[in-house]
Image (cartoon, rainbow, N blue to C red):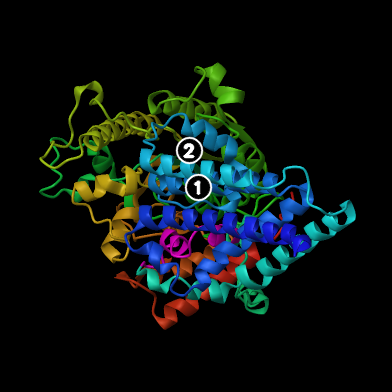
Amino acid sequence: MKKFLPILQFILGVFVTGLVICLLSLYLVGTRFQEGLFASFFQPQTIFYYNLLPILLGLVFLAFLTGSLKASILTNSIFWLVLSYVHVLKIHYRQEPLYASDVRFLREAGIMARKYSLELDSKILLLVLGIFLILYAWSSFFDRDSLPLNFPLRIFGSLAALVCMVQMTGTLLFDDGVYRSLGQASGLNTWQELNNYASKGFSYPLIYSLKTAKGYVYPDYDEARAKDLASKGHDENIPQGQKVNFICIMLESYKDFYKYQNPKMVFTENPYAYWYDLQKESIHGNLYVNTFGGGTILSEMCFWSGYRNSPIYNVPRYTYVSYFKDQGYKTQAFHPSDGLFNNRHNIYPKIGFDDFFYSQNYFDEAVHPGVLSDEEFFPELLKVFKDQAKNDQPYFSWSISYQGHGPYPDSVVGKGRVFVKKQEGYDESQWFAFNNYLQSVKETSDQLRDLVDGLREEEPTVLILFGDHSPSMGDQAIGMKMMGIPSDLSTVEGMQASYETPYMIWANPKAKEVFKGRTLVGKGPNLEPNFLMAYAMKSLGLKGTAFCQFSQDLLDKQTVMKPSLACEGGVWKDQLSPQGQSLYRDYLNYEYYRSRMIREEK
């Protein structure tokens, strides 16, 4: 019996440790996300097992690899407890779960975290630290030196655990059908990505997210259908006399809250006054983006690619930017902050930009070090545009502003300006933060006036403006609930209010003369960001690429196509009709075919 004691100790150490880590991670998600969610992880028990197994195999693998169960217990405890806590923080501050691909943005996350005053929940923090101390004490019962095995057997054991992990991941954890079927007992709307992730625990959906870390894969791809769709069209050149300039600006966290006025949110003045004025001489409407409170890069990629699901831009790809470049345009991008964020300095050359101006290579010296406000940023855009206009070459520019980015001061009203009256029952810090956000909106709107006035007498130019996403509105979007704005993501109204941002397409007088006969003023359709450029070109009578033409034709039938939010024939629905779903599958097939093509440099 004595000779089996080390084996029993090993099994006990691995199982108890894995069980504690798994239960804590599930408890953190369950109690912080929705009451009763923790219990649903055991209905069926498959969810619990799928969360437990990778933790157990990780313990076994590292124990054999290091020859120390104690080292494995401590390392795995730190790894999973830290990730669990970061996951909870990310949900509450960004309304987004932790993905395996987030490891690519550790640098950006560290920089942004320093700018936020994270209110760490002391109870949760103490619980995590307490569990770690218990596991640390538990690990002391095990020999720290080595397992009673020789080196070859340890290598064999670690490889066996690794093979089991890979096999289990490929056959069980990566099974799309199983993943979709689990989590129904949670009561959450699993069509919404955050809810879908949370309904399945933590370690299981985290590992499942590895599938997307390597880039988007359309699971129902029909290559024959995609090639058939592509063969029905061809790229169209822009007529020489219609090669107007395009200036496209994505405004950070720019959202129209004035339209949501209600007894719980009473404005004292309209911070969007100029935006409303500019609508009178523009095409304007609403976008329904795919992210909330963050995820700027998602809205950005949708716009300049035309793809809802973007590939990895590690090789030259076909995008709207590359189309304009091939049409003889000078293509430039601007961001008044760190150019390394979201790997833009490497991505932009792959999608067709000639130049990229950012803090390190331009703005730090041209203006000042650090991020720029729109009062500083927009004049630089106008200056570079006017310099380029001297070259007798059509011009396409893309810019991401920074003003409007959180966090917003939450203890005092900046500049003493109150846009929304304080009411009984308000969370005071959220009221301060919201008013300071609206002050930023007012300043952005005012700076747009100077930019537009500077473009009025220039050569034919089209200005495209839109917001990238809503501001975060506090922990679990408490600001929206506090001010009576729909936020229940299980309803069409809540989805609209959470993911809606405004867009505008403005043409200066000379551009309107070029496209005389086109209606360039009025209400535009509800759109997803990947359709905005196609719609802008359609409004001007420009056909663009074959994929652009396909998108333009699709817009005659349906303009928003999300799993739980659709606009078909101008009517809002919670899902597309069977015919609409068929058209959507055609779009996904063609998109996947087109987006994976490697662009040939001209």
Q: Residues within 10 Å of mark 1 (few under 14, many from 20)?
A: many
Q: Disc 2 designates what residue? A: 400
Which label belongs to residue 300? 1
Secondary element at image label 2: strand
**Residue reaching furthest to the bottom:** 578
Magenta segment includes 206: yes
Do tag 2 and tag 1 residues touch (Cβ < 8 Å)? Answer: yes
The foreground one among 98 and 515 is 98
Please tell me whether residue 586 is drawn above or below residue 338 in the rendered image.
below
Q: Amino acid at mark 2?
A: Ile
Q: Residue at x 35, y 70 (%)?
A: 187
Expressed as whole percent of the image width and height from the top left, the position of residue 571 reads 30, 71
Q: Residues within 10 Å of mark 2 (few under 14, many from 20)?
A: many
Q: Which residues are magenta?
A: 188-207
Expressed as whole percent of the image width and height from the top left, the position of residue 443 reads 30, 29
* Residue 378 showing in the rendered view: yes
Q: CA distance from mark 2 to mark 1?
A: 8 Å
* Residue 174 showing in the rendered view: no
Q: Amino acid at mark 1?
A: Glu
